[in-house]
Image: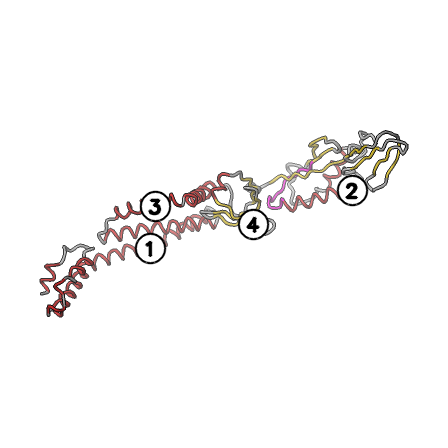
Amino acid sequence: MRQAWRDRALPATPLSFPLVVIQAAGPESDPRSGNLVTDAAGLLDLVLDTSFRLLPRLALAALVLAAFVGISFIVRALLRRVFERAHLERDVAEILQTLARYVAIGLGVMLALENLGLNVTSVLAGLGIVGIALGFAAKDTLANLIAGITILWDRPFRVGDRIEVSGSEGVVQKITLRTTRLDTPRNEVVILPNQNMMTEKIVNHTMRPSLRIDIPFGIAYRHEVEDARRVVLAIVQGDENIRAKPEPQVVVTALADSSVNLQLRFWLKDPRLEIPMEFRYTEKIKAALDAAEIEIPFPQMVLHVAGEAGTVRVLPDGGASRRGGGEPSVERDGGGDDGRNGA
């Protein structure tokens, strides 16, 4: 009877075991035949015989898979050392190490399946078709993944850089394959898709070791530019955060309607100090000009009233002066006694 079970078995292939079991459960194994015990013994013998034939291939497949899992850890450790010597960002290094590990394990799985007699080419073809379908269904996600890989390769910014993009400004906290995260000065977290990061204009404030700061201010026309330049340049002397070369400058940027517009320019040793240094020296310029009695223009209103009452000028402090005649009119003065207002 056992020989009969063997004769009924399908040709010995790695994947024939399930088919043999199904065939063994045919009508001839009906308990009413009176041969239930004999059939069960034959089935057990068939299972053992098939298992012994598959056991070497299963063991080899397991060894191959285990070997590639071990190789994946070795590759990860080697890449970690290479990336540390290259001073690659930690997040980027982790992504590349994980990707290399999964590639090694994937190769191991393919070789293990091939040792079991499975047609790997057919499996890959099926996965390719599934991949195409998923690609059409998740094209935006794939676009972000491709953009993330491009960012990691091109490196227009790094973790810790202060950047402006898509109307947002902050310090890069983390770069992933799908998104980039920024910490804003208000302690907000802005999450931007990598696709936007590749298509929008990016301003990187900290990519270079030095950064120029421009602080605008204005003085009245009745004051000398050289006096204001001397006063403002004095406040930056001795600041260790400012480079001596190129030297700080005060330049005239425009001759406006009511003021001479100037700009203080200096170079920072550490670009990360941009915001606090702008705040600090804006306040220092105001204090220095006030101490030197150099007027910073501000809007004023001039009111001309015609008639017997004369002309009334509304002063900034709420007072008024009266002269002349004519119809009432309102005139605005930007500040500073530059002799151009007909008050």
Lower position in the chain sequence, tag 2 or tag 4: 4
Q: In the image, is 209 to the left or to the right of 34?
A: right
Lower position in the chain sequence, tag 2 or tag 1: 1
| Disc 3 from disc 1: Cα separation | 24 Å
Q: Residue 107 versus residue 90: which sits nearer the camera?
A: 107
Per the image, is 190 magenta? no
Lower position in the chain sequence, tag 3 or tag 2: 3
Per the image, is 268 magenta? yes
Q: Which mark is residue 69?
A: 1
Tag 1: amino acid: Val
Asked if disc 3 and disc 1 are in contact, CB closer than 8 Å, the reply is: no
Placement of 55 over or under 200, stated as above or below: below
Residue drawn at x 89%, y 32% is 310
Which residue is labeled 3 in the image? 131
Placement of 74 over or under 305, stated as above or below: below
Q: Nearer the viewer, mark 4 or mark 3?
A: 3
Q: Which mark is residue 183?
A: 4
Q: Residue 8 versus residue 281: which sits nearer the camera?
A: 8
